[in-house]
Image (cartoon, grey):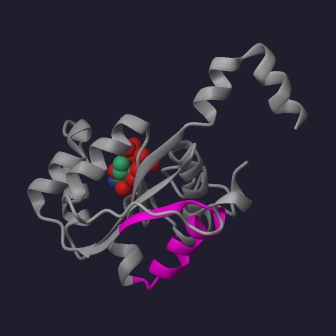
C-alpha cells in the first residue's frame, strides 16, 4: 500500500505507533441504553473489526462517575454530567485493536452531536452534548486507566477471533 510504504521510509516512528495494538474503554451511556441503541452501537465496533474483551451492564455509583470524569471536575456542567451518567445502567466495554483509541473516537464522532459527521454514532444517533450516547477513551493511557477503573480482574477475556488473519496482515 503506497501511502504506508512512503510513511515507512520517512516516518518509521509514526507508522510504528499507528500500528500499535491498543485497548480502549467504550461505554454506552444511560440514554443509549434507555433508547434501545445497545445493539446498534456494539455492532459498529464489531463490524469495524475490533475485538471485544470486556462487556457488562452496570449501574455506576456516583464515586466511580466522579473518578472517571475527574479531569472535568472544575467544569460548570460537572454535577449535571455525574447525574446523567448515574441516571440508569450503562454498558461498559473494553475493545482491542490496531489504533483502536483514535479509530473508535472517529466512529463515535465529535463531543457535540451537532458537529458530529453523519455516519458517526453521535452524528447518526444523538442531538445534544449532554445526551451524546457513548464514551470513548481519548488516549491509550486513558484507555488502560479506564478499563482498570471499570472492570475487575477476571471480567476481561483474552481471545483470538477466527477472522483475525482476514483483518490484519
Ligand atoms: P468526549 O466525551 O467527546 O471525550 P469531553 O471529555 O470533553 O468529551 O466531555 C466528557 C463528557 O462530558 C461529554 O461526552 C458529555 O457527555 C459531557 N459534556 C461535555 N461538555 C458538556 C457541556 N458543555 N454540557 C453538558 N455536558 C457536557
The residue at 60%/51% (across/down) is 115
Position of residue 81 in the picture relative to residue 102 (left or right) = left
Q: In the image shown, does 39 or 5 lie closer to the viewer?
A: 5
Percent across and percent down for residue 165 are 69, 58
Number of numbered labels in the structure image: 0
**In the picture provided, is 165 more to the left or to the right than 68?**
right
Comparing 73 with 102, the one in front is 102
Residue at image point 56% right, 65% down:
45
In the rendered image, the residue lying farthest to the top is 10
Q: Write down the quadrant of residue 80 in the picture.
A: bottom left
Residue at image position (11%, 60%) is: 62
**Which region is colored magenta?**
35-54
Q: Looking at the picture, does residue 149 appear above or below residue 39?
A: above
* Left or right relative to 104: residue 60: left
Asked which quadrant contains residue 74, the reply is top left
Question: Which image quarter is the N terminus in?
Answer: top right
Q: Which residue is drawn at the image coordinates 61% and 69% (left, top)?
A: 162
Q: Is residue 33 magenta?
A: no
Where is residue 23 shown, x and y percent of the image?
A: 44, 48
Amino acid at each position: 500500500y503506497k501511502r504506508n510504504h512512503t510513511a515507512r521510509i520517512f516516518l518509521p516512528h509514526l507508522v510504528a505507533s499507528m500500528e500499535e495494538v491498543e485497548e480502549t474503554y467504550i461505554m454506552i451511556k444511560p440514554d443509549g441504553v434507555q433508547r434501545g441503541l445497545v445493539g446498534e452501537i456494539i455492532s459498529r465496533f464489531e463490524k469495524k473489526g475490533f475485538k471485544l474483551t470486556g462487556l457488562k451492564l452496570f449501574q455506576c455509583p456516583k464515586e466511580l462517575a466522579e473518578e472517571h470524569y475527574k479531569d472535568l471536575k472544575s467544569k460548570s456542567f460537572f454535577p449535571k454530567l455525574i447525574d446523567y451518567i448515574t441516571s440508569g445502567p450503562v454498558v461498559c466495554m473494553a475493545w482491542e485493536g490496531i489504533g483502536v483509541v483514535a479509530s473508535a473516537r472517529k466512529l463515535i464522532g465529535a463531543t457535540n452531536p451537532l458537529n458530529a459527521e453523519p455516519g458517526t454514532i453521535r452524528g447518526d444517533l444523538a442531538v445534544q452534548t449532554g445526551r451524546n450516547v457513548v464514551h470513548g477513551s481519548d488516549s491509550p493511557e486513558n484507555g488502560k486507566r479506564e478499563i482498570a477503573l471499570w472492570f475487575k480482574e477476571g471480567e476481561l477475556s483474552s481471545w483470538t477471533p477466527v477472522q483475525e488473519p482476514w483483518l490484519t496482515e
